[in-house]
């Protein structure tokens, strides 16, 4: 049940140890609990620390008040009082037993308890059900340390009960698998799939947070593969892509495996994860393929138009999940453009670059590269086209080329000075001058652009 390693005590920062010892000195039990203990056991540095205690909320408040520690107690009815320290906030929660979860989010009532053995029953997974006192002694009633060694995610107690209490735990299991690289214990996975339909009762915002966490995790491909049946409740097209063969010499895997490979090629930064827009775009980029699939007369598979259909799927799902508007716009645009490869010509590249924000173009390069690398060896030949396009775009930027009307050396006032009075016409003239600049008919100086504007006005009298 317990392990005593003095080195673990050193992993608890002083501001947290002070809270533990203060509560203990008042005659109560107090432990670092949950994810922080898991991270310490795994040799990682926790990002935050939660404390579990036998002290009831009013007793915790009394302890903090006497010690002069600032706190806020807006969650005290659920047992949580938050200490405000120079090192960071520390949530201190009374041992408790949760009642029913009618809203699939918070317990309808909580009953305060006095021991770890009672408190642990409300925890989700064994790896999150460990407790550590101020001396570094670990209390582990559910075998979390062993499951950490086995790299296993296992529900505390009866998994059906845990997921009936809070269906969001189903996605949390997949997120922990994605983040840690752990397998999900078979009975836990069975219960997740059994109760997956209950995710429909969870708010879109909460599901979105978990889904983003899943795709951004270091081990996202294997986690999504394991949780495919669950995730298909949220995005049915994921399930449709599983086992869907592409019948093309450019692909050597089904659509789902190709998608997971693309996601795996999206750069992962230790401590930061993947770029969330890129990771989500990788997940959605080919989900429209099954709906677009057709055989030609030679028995070769084609999926023309799949970027548009995939974009529609992304828009539908991300709007249902109430993701931020800019996030939806960027992800859907990346999905739409992922298979767009223009001719590697300076004018064509310049025009393309003038159509989209630089941030989107930079992310598109990453997505396209990941997509190409997930093709068959023959399909990977397209990498040469991408490299040619990238060379041209970098040369354009290095040359000082501009990519929007606002960066031209002339503006609407200059056009007015030439005698143009109508607002729409001014905009049309600037657009045409910008196009002529891209085509190399003039350079971006006031004299050159003004001369081109005069030519244009002679061609189309005011």
Image (cartoon, helix red, strand yellow):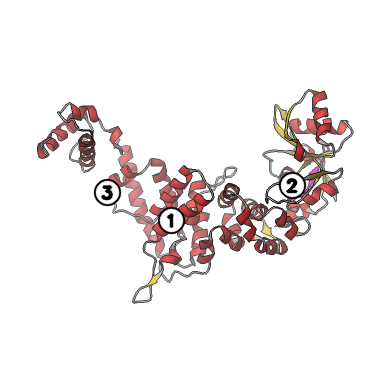
Spatial separation of the CA atoms under disc 2 and disc 3: 61 Å
Residue occupied by mark 2:
108
Residue occupied by mark 1:
312
Q: Which mark is residue 348?
A: 3
Label 3 SS: helix
Of residues 329 and 140, the one drawn nearer to the viewer in this rendering: 329
Q: Nearer the viewer, mark 2 or mark 1?
A: 2
Measured as percent of width and height from the top left, residue 159 is found at 74, 59
**282 displayed left or right of 29:** left
Measured as percent of width and height from the top left, residue 120 is found at 80, 49
Q: Nearer the viewer, mark 3 or mark 1?
A: 1
**Magenta stretch bounds:** 128-134
Query: Is residue 266 among the parts visible in the rendering?
Result: no
Q: Residue at x 70, y 56 (%)?
A: 163
Crowding at mark 2 (Cα within 10 Å: few <14, some 14-19, many 20+) = few
First in sequence: mark 2 vs mark 3: 2
Residue 54 part of the magenta-drawn span: no
244 up-or-down from 337: above or below: below
Query: Is residue 70 among the parts visible in the rendering?
Result: yes
**9 displayed left or right of 303:** right
Q: Quadrant of residue 292?
A: bottom left
């Amino acid at each position: 049940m317990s392990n005593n390693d003095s080195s673990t005590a050193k992993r608890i920062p002083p501001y947290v140890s002070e809270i533990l010892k203060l509560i203990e000195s008042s005659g109560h039990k107090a432990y670092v609990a949950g994810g922080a203990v898991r991270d310490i056991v795994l040799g990682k540095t926790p990002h935050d620390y939660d404390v579990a205690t036998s002290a009831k909320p009013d007793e915790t408040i009394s302890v903090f008040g006497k010690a002069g520690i600032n706190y806020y107690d807006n969650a005290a009815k659920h047992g949580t009082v938050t200490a405000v320290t120079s090192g960071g906030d520390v949530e201190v929660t009374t041992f408790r037993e949760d009642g029913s979860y009618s809203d699939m989010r918070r317990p309808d009532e909580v009953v305060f308890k006095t021991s770890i053995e009672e408190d642990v029953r409300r925890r989700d997974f064994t790896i999150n059900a460990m407790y550590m006192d101020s001396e570094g002694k670990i209390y582990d009633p559910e075998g979390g340390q062993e499951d950490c060694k086995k790299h296993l995610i296992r529900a505390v107690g009866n998994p059906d009960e845990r997921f009936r209490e809070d269906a969001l735990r189903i996605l949390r299991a997949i997120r922990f698998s994605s983040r840690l690289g752990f397998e999900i214990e078979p009975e836990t996975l069975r219960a997740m799939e059994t109760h997956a339909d209950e995710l429909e009762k969870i708010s879109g915002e909460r599901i979105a947070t978990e889904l983003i966490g899943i795709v951004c995790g270091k081990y996202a491909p294997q986690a999504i593969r394991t949780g495919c049946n669950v995730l298909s409740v949220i995005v049915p097209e994921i399930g449709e892509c599983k086992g869907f063969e592409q019948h093309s010499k450019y692909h050597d895997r089904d659509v789902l495996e190709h998608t997971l490979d693309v996601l795996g090629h999206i750069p992962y930064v230790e401590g930061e994860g993947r770029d969330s827009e890129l990771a989500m775009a990788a997940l959605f980029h080919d989900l429209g393929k099954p709906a677009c699939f057709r055989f030609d007369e030679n028995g070769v598979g084609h999926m023309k138009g799949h970027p548009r259909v995939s974009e529609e799927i992304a828009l539908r799902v991300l709007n249902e999940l109430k993701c931020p508007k800019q996030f939806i716009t960027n992800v859907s645009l990346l999905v739409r453009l992922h298979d767009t490869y223009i001719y590697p010509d300076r004018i064509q590249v310049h025009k393309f670059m003038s159509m989209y924000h630089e941030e989107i173009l930079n992310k598109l390069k990453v997505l396209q590269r990941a997509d190409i690398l997930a093709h068959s060896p023959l399909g990977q030949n397209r990498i040469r086209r991408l490299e040619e396009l990238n060379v041209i775009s970098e040369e354009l930027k290095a040359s000082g080329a501009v990519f929007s009307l606002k960066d031209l050396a002339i503006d609407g006032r200059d056009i007015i000075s030439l005698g143009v009075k109508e607002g729409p016409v001014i905009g049309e003239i600037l657009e045409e001058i910008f196009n002529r600049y891209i085509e190399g008919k003039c350079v971006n100086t006031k004299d050159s652009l003004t001369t081109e504007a005069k030519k244009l006005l002679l061609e189309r009298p005011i």
